[in-house]
Image (spheres, rainbow, N blue to C red):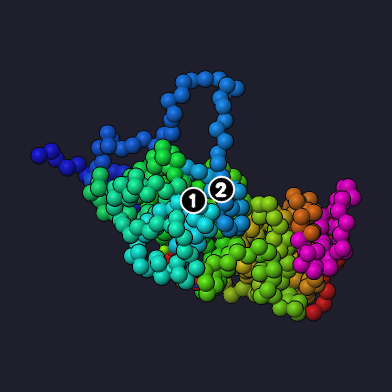
Amino acid sequence: MAKVKTKWVCQNCGYESAKYIGKCPDCGSWGTLTEEVEVKQTNQKQNIITDDSPVCLIKEIEIKESIKFSTGFEELDRVLGNGLVQGSLVLLAGDPGIGKSTLILQTAGNICKKGKKLLYVCAEESSSQVKLRAQRLNVNSDNLYVYSQTNLESVITQLETIKPEILVIDSIQSIYTSNITSSSGSVSQIRECTNTLMDIAKNKNITVIIIGHVTKDGNIAGPKVLEHMVDTVIYFEGDKYKSQRLLRSIKNRFGSTNEIGVFNMAENGLEEVTNPSELFMKERTDNAVPGSVIIATNEGTRALLVEVQALVGATSYPSPRRVSTGTEFNRLLQIIAVLEKRIGLNLSKHDVYVNVTGGIEIDEPAADLGIALAIATCYRDVVVDTNCVIIGEISLSGEIRNVSNLEKRIYEAQKLGFKKAIIPKQNKKLQGNYDIQIIEVARLMDAISACVSKK
Ligand code: TYD
Ligand code: MG
């Protein structure tokens, strides 16, 4: 009998070694290498999409138009780049219990209503559990097939008989292929199954949606390689104890990765939030609070209003604490440095905490001025007017720099009833007609005097 060869694979990053090592040399995590049976290279399908076309000049290549179809959710379509692409492989990742199965089942209902055939493989639940959820979500269609199965080969056999246009695998961690002996959820299994699913998507022109769980440290359980293999990676995020959910694409071969989608988890499933600014503003109090500022950020094609809060207090640590949630840490340090040097705030003995409400991650510099004003007002115990929106990037010299999509941001503020917008000084007159007072500021100092008042 031929000797079964094994290898040691890091379950965190997919690093392979011939012998056991305590610490993975690639990702640095300890105790993550487990022994797995080696897969013969000849068995492995290559993850290369070829159509046996000859070498040709770029100008001679004919573009095959990718066919997109709607998921029935505008928010999801936007994140996917105007809908699902026929024959693509999409990975939807998120914490357990965040609502991935709910989102996909509702999406499946929407798609099937339009006459497309869909096979939903529930590897984690029984068919009756799925039926119960579907009843609650009011999903019922003649085109929606449910298959409770963990073996990939059995699923492939069903593909031949049912011939669906869309295949959903819930989840990639609980499905296995008989080609290899490692247990389901292991790196080799996940990799092999995804490879096979990629093959199905490309060769049979079936759109495949894979659901994947993320680990405690926020990575998709299994190797990072999974992200490289698929066409689109979407994260479904949110606080489990709150109803708001965010969809964010981190890789998309068919669209931009800047877009976000907002949902609300309700009694009967997920509801789209078409105007997220309203939702983010809902929890605000009417009274002005020191350290609270509204900024207009840009997420993909739309502007969003979010609240930035700062807390500044005397430190009891040897070196003061700087904590940022929802903003970039280094950006915060830079803003603090500018406030110290240009405005004369002495923050060296103060802790500074900055928080963006609503679970949004802001990584664009247009939030600088808002963050700076939040810190400055909390430090001086004054307030920014509640009907005022702050927009602007800060340079190291304390000047306010222009930002992209300024008009869209101002319109969003106007739509939500704000009365005043602090914006960077413009060289040209703004095009639009606004119903909102616009104050152009050139320096950080001017912004403070334009919108700050005593409590
Ligand atoms: P689920 O889709 O099972 O999560 P995942 O597949 O990501 O593990 O969602 C589970 C949670 O969603 C559960 O805590 C209950 C909640 N939920 C609702 O609030 N309303 C609903 O209509 C449904 C179906 C679920
Ligand atoms: Mg689930």
Q: Look at the numbered disc 2 and give the secondary structure of its residue.
A: strand
* Residue 89: image location, x then y, percent: 46, 46
Residue extending farthest to the front is 142
Q: Look at the numbered disc 1 and give the secondary structure of its residue.
A: loop
How packed is label 1: few (under 14 Cα within 10 Å), some, or many (20 or more)? some
* Residue 60: image location, x then y, percent: 57, 21
The answer to which of 293 and 312 lies nearer the viewer is 293
* Residue 77 counted in the magenta span: no
Residue extending farthest to the left is 1
Labelled disc at residue 384: none
Q: Which residue is mark 1?
A: 116
Labelled disc at residue 69: 2
Q: Is residue 231 left or right of residue 74?
A: left
**Dot placed on the residue nearer the N-terminal end, 1 or 2:** 2
Please give the name of the residue rendered at 63% of the width and 68% of the height, measured from the top-left corner: 357
* Residue 429 counted in the magenta span: yes
Q: Is residue 248 left or right of residue 383?
A: left
Please give the name of the residue rendered at 25% of the width and 48% of the height, measured from the top-left corner: 178
Q: Quadrant of residue 310?
A: bottom right
- Gap between marks 1 and 2 measured at Cα: 10 Å
* Residue 2: image location, x then y, percent: 13, 38
Please give the name of the residue rendered at 45% of the width and 62% of the height, measured from the top-left corner: 101
The answer to which of 343 and 95 lies nearer the viewer is 95
230 versus 101 height, above or below: above
Q: Report the span colored magenta.
A: 412-441
Q: Are marks 1 and 2 in contact (CB under 8 Å)?
A: yes
* Residue 152: image location, x then y, percent: 31, 50
Q: Is residue 15 visible?
A: no
Q: Quadrant of residue 335?
A: bottom right
Q: Amino acid at mark 1?
A: Lys
How packed is label 2: few (under 14 Cα within 10 Å), some, or many (20 or more)? some
